[in-house]
Image: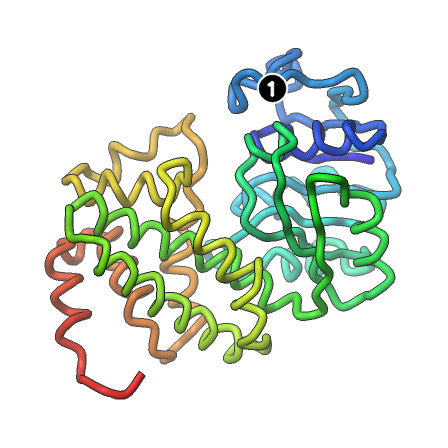
Amino acid sequence: MAVVGAGAWGTALSVHAARLGHEVALWARHPDRVFSENSRLPGVALPAGVRVVREVPPSDCVLMTVPMQHLRAVLTAQRPAGPLLLCCKGFETGTGSLPLEVAAQILPDALAAVLTGPNFAHEIAAGLPAAAVIAGGDASLRAMFISLLAGPTFRLYGNDDAVGAQLGGATKNVFAIAAGAVTGAGLGENARAALITRGLTEMARLAVALGGRAETVFGLSGLGDMILSCGSATSRNFALGFSLGRGAALGDLLPPDGPVVEGVATAPAILARAGDLDLPVTRAVADLLAARVTLQEAIGRLLARKLKDE
């Protein structure tokens, strides 16, 4: 098995796979910086079954764990041979493409599916109980990935609605920023609950508009990921929103060598892809990130919308 990307998520999945008995080739952009322990996952050592490599070897299973905004470049440069499991979430800036769409553009003949759901890397690495979704149109491919990665503490479900599953994983980052912002500003639990709930409605609306199913977002890849990301300071998107709510400037929260906060790029990408679709919470987050409105102005705008039935 090959894992492409030695960040927190790639390292966690490598540790998990090795725990299941797989031999793992972990590709790192800078392999000389990856030692027995990854600085992104303090206290988690790479087991003997994981070897760090400079080139992605042909494999029966290739897990792409690089951030969404780097997926195209890494696929183009490495051109991995083997079925692909895309383990990143978001829309590509500029093109508005989802992970499977990027993979199809670069490697049109590759078999590919996505892994998504409510998973923090450090908990997967620690072997704590979790569940996730393998989504894709090929039932046999889903079954293969599930058989390779499911374990005693990691329950996997299949889903043939890859569009809905990808949208859940992408859009929840935007709503996590919103939830963090209202929490950081001290606007109360009522406001946070309202944003999460209305965000879920937007998620379903977008899924249907792009060819997915509304019910998919009420599963692990949508609602499950929302619950995880919108209520925990461990979520990078929630933490960034929290700091914005406390008055911090966005530029100070995104150091060049810091972890990727996918929701920052995802909010405007959603709007570009959605056209005239009614997505008021997403639009408010995009305007807040672009400093077109203050948090109080964004909340005021949402509350002033025309009253209607839910």
Taking the spot 68% from the left edge, 55% from the top edge, the residue there is: 114
Residue at the outermost bottom position:
309
Q: Where is the C terminus found, in terms of image quarters?
A: bottom left
Q: Which residue is mark 1?
A: 44
The relative height of residue 161 versus residue 127 in the rendered view (above or below) is below
Badge 1 amino acid: Val
Residue 193 screen position, x and y as percent? 29, 60
- Residue closer to the observer: 43 or 56: 43
Residue 116 screen position, x and y as percent? 61, 52
Residue 91 seen by the camera: no
Residue at disc 1, secondary structure? loop
Mark 1 burial class by Cα count in 10 Å: few <14, some 14-19, many 20+: some
Q: Where is the N terminus found, in terms of image quarters?
A: top right
Residue 285 screen position, x and y as percent? 28, 58
- The part of the image, by quadrant, that contains residue 152 is top right
Taking the spot 71% from the left edge, 52% from the top edge, the residue there is: 156
Is 84 displayed left or right of 34 in the figure? right
